[in-house]
Amino acid sequence: MAGRVVILGAPGAGKGTQARRVARKHGWPHISTGDIFRSHVDHKTAIGQKIESYMHSGQLVPDDLACQIVVERLAAPDCTSGYILDGFPRSVPQAESLDQMLSDRHESLDAVILLTVDDDELVERLTSRWTCPHCGKIYNVKFNPPKRENQCDKPECEGVRLVQREDDREDTVRSRLRVYHETTEPLIQHYGRRSLLQRVAGGASPEAIEQEIEGMLTAQGAS
Ligand code: AP5
Ligand code: MG
């Protein structure tokens, strides 16, 4: 059965950590609009140049651009048997646009998972997050450190130094949290009205959260 899943939550709630696990388990693509945009910025594409200042200041890139990226990505053949969307939608216009994209394809979402974590913990998590630029594995020097200081654990990433994201400075993290509360939180109502929303306490261990999400997906028949 296909599984079309959205993972919602504030910056640092663990969307990327959990989406990677779900995607690997089910063989679905993990579609992170943040990762797609960061790749455009790193490669200095025309889109990257247009969005760099939004991303570095913690603002959302314009809705039309985010929707265009997702329409193109969902049309790829690897999305036919399911996907997990991480970081999209994050405004009501984006959610309405996703509703339209799905209805044009006679499809619907199977689950929307909301990870909830307190703001103070989010700031602490993001200011101590490090990522492998080679494989994308996410670490945290306080909660989930790599085995060797500043190096990815995976053998295929031998010698690769972990990096910090440009938008993980404390002042930018606080701007991202403001944007989340103002613009993204209304999606809780948007999906809640349709009984699609499932809340998961994001303060538990990554393994416990993964199990809880898996139980929800199985119950929804999205596995
Ligand atoms: P995006 O990349 O989506 O960032 P975000 O939403 O701010 O979320 P993060 O990636 O920072 O956090 P996460 O929830 O993935 O947490 P993670 O698993 O890494 O977007 C970045 C920017 O791109 C936006 O600001 C915007 O400019 C633009 N953008 C993207 N999509 C857009 C859209 N649709 N429209 C417009 N603009 C868009 O975990 C965080 C840390 O916590 C890690 O260190 C991890 O190890 C640790 N951790 C995870 N789980 C746990 C746990 N259970 N316990 C303890 N620590 C944990
Ligand atoms: Mg992420």
Image (spheres, helix red, strand yellow):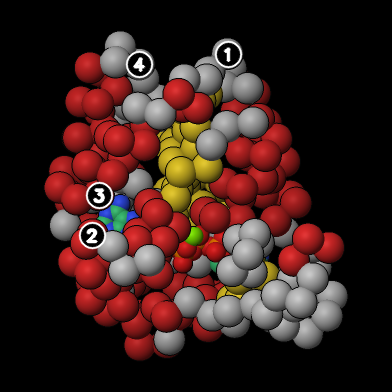
Q: Nearer the viewer, mark 2 or mark 3?
A: 2
**Residue positioned 61% across, 56% down in the render:** 17
Which disc number belongs to residue 107? Answer: 4
Q: Quadrant location of the C terminus?
A: top right
- Pointer 4 or 2: first along the chain: 2
Whichever of callouts 2 and 1 sits on the residue coming sooner in the sequence is: 1
Discs 2, 3 touching: Cβ within 8 Å: no
Separation of marks 2 and 1 at Cα, in angstroms:
35 Å
What is the spatial separation of the Cα atoms under label 1 and label 4, in whole angstroms?
13 Å
Q: Which residue is mark 3?
A: 66
Whether pointer 4 and pointer 3 mark residues with C-beta atoms closer than 8 Å, the reply is no
Q: Which mark is residue 47?
A: 2
Q: Element under label 2? A: helix
The type of residue carrying mark 1 is Met
Image quadrant containing the N terminus: top right
Callout 4 secondary element: loop
Q: Amino acid at mark 2?
A: Ile
Q: Is the residue 178 above or below the residue 5 in the image?
A: below
Mark 3, secondary structure of its residue = helix
